[in-house]
Image (cartoon, helix red, strand yellow):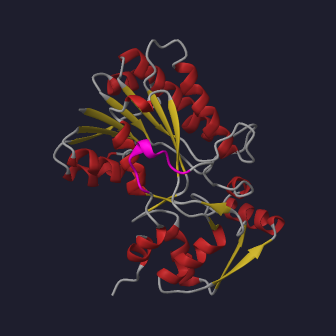
């Protein structure tokens, strides 16, 4: 099959592209900066191209002739706005809408979209509200479709080699004697990146997944503080976590937002932590995925180099 992976140069994308190639698929990966997808070019059936996926004509050209389109695009930060900022709107709402419409025009057999666990139009953060709006935009694009051909996944925070979650906390532990943070008691259910890619691969041809939304979460619920302690311990730098009041956390996040580049933490990120990131039910058995425990994987890739 010919598969278009939008956002394929990112963390989940790199894992997914490798798995698709191993199964014999031809994969196309558009990216804003050609150099970001350079490491994917070692795969013989991968084509990396510089393209603006927000441009409708470009998107039509990319989608044309594809059997499957996967959208992995997601951002963690945006300028402010109500109900969400313009950057969230562009990446999480307008782009999925345009992709769905392009798939409709091209009669693409399957569109797979990655949303987020906890996506909610009334959610506490612009991130969660925009993710919910993106799901609505996709469903509206298929409202009058003769055959529904989209599948939406809602993963919890995703861990695995080269993640920006457990690795970030391990990196902080290396330099800070104590890890101060707000929202340490927030609950989350991290899911292994290979489990996410397995779920995507297993629904590509599955009729049961048409017009469906699936939650993806790991086998155990942790507090954020527990995860930070584990990341520090497994990376060889055990640390104490100091739970800050949300008022101090917001000041801390505001200070990070003033620094150049992507902030380590934003006030919107903190707002997301006020809602537990936990699945309502165990992973749907039809997906054919047995959730991988964090403890069986993270200590290996977080272990200090010897």
From the viewer's perspective, is residue 208 above or below residue 119?
A: above
Of residues 27 and 112, the one drawn nearer to the viewer in this rendering = 112
Q: Can you give x and y, in whole percent of width and height, for residue 195 in the image?
A: 41, 54
- Is residue 268 visible in the rendered structure shown here? yes
Of residues 200 and 12, the one drawn nearer to the viewer in this rendering = 200
Quadrant location, the C terminus: bottom left
Most common secondary structure along the magenta stretch: loop
Q: Can you give x and y, in whole percent of width and height, for residue 45 in the image?
A: 18, 42
Quadrant location, the N terminus: top left
Q: Can you give x and y, in whole percent of width and height, for residue 183 in the image?
A: 72, 65
Q: Is residue 1 magenta?
A: no
From the viewer's perspective, is residue 65 above or below residue 209?
A: above
Residue at 66% in and 44% down: 128
Span colored in magenta: 282-290
Residue at 52% in and 61% down: 219
Residue at 70% in and 52% down: 268
Q: Quadrant of residue 274?
A: bottom right
Question: Quick one: which residue is furthest to the front in this view?
Answer: 285
Q: Is residue 277 left or right of residue 164?
A: right
From the viewer's perspective, is residue 62 above or below residue 253?
A: above
């Amino acid at each position: 099959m010919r598969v278009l992976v939008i956002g394929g140069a990112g963390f989940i994308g790199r894992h997914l592209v490798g798995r698709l190639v191993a199964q014999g698929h031809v994969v196309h990966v558009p990216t804003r900066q050609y150099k970001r997808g350079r490491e994917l070019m070692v795969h013989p059936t991968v084509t990396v191209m510089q393209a603006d996926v927000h441009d409708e004509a470009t998107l039509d050209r990319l989608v044309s002739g594809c059997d499957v389109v996967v959208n992995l695009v997601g951002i963690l930060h945006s300028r402010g706005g109500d109900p969400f900022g313009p950057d969230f709107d562009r990446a999480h709402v307008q782009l999925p809408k345009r992709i769905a419409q392009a798939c409709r025009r091209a009669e693409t057999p399957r569109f797979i979209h990655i949303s987020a666990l906890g996506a909610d139009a009334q959610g506490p953060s612009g991130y969660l509200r925009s993710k919910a709006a993106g799901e609505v935009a996709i469903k509206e694009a298929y409202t009058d479709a003769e055959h529904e051909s989209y599948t939406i996944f809602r993963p919890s925070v995703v861990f695995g080699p080269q993640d920006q979650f457990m690795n970030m906390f391990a990196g902080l532990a290396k330099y800070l004697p104590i890890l101060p943070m707000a929202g340490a008691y927030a609950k989350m259910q991290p899911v292994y990146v290979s489990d996410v890619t397995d779920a995507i691969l297993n629904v590509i041809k599955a009729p049961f997944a048409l017009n469906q939304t699936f939650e993806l979460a790991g086998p155990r619920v942790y507090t954020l503080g527990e995860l930070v302690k584990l990341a520090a311990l497994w990376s060889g730098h055990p640390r104490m976590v100091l739970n800050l009041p949300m008022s101090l956390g917001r000041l801390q996040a505001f200070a990070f937002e003033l620094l150049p580049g992507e902030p380590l933490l934003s006030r919107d990120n903190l707002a997301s932590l006020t809602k537990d990131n936990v699945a309502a039910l165990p992973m749907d058995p039809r997906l054919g995925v047995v959730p991988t425990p964090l403890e069986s994987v993270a200590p290996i890739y977080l272990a200090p180099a010897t």
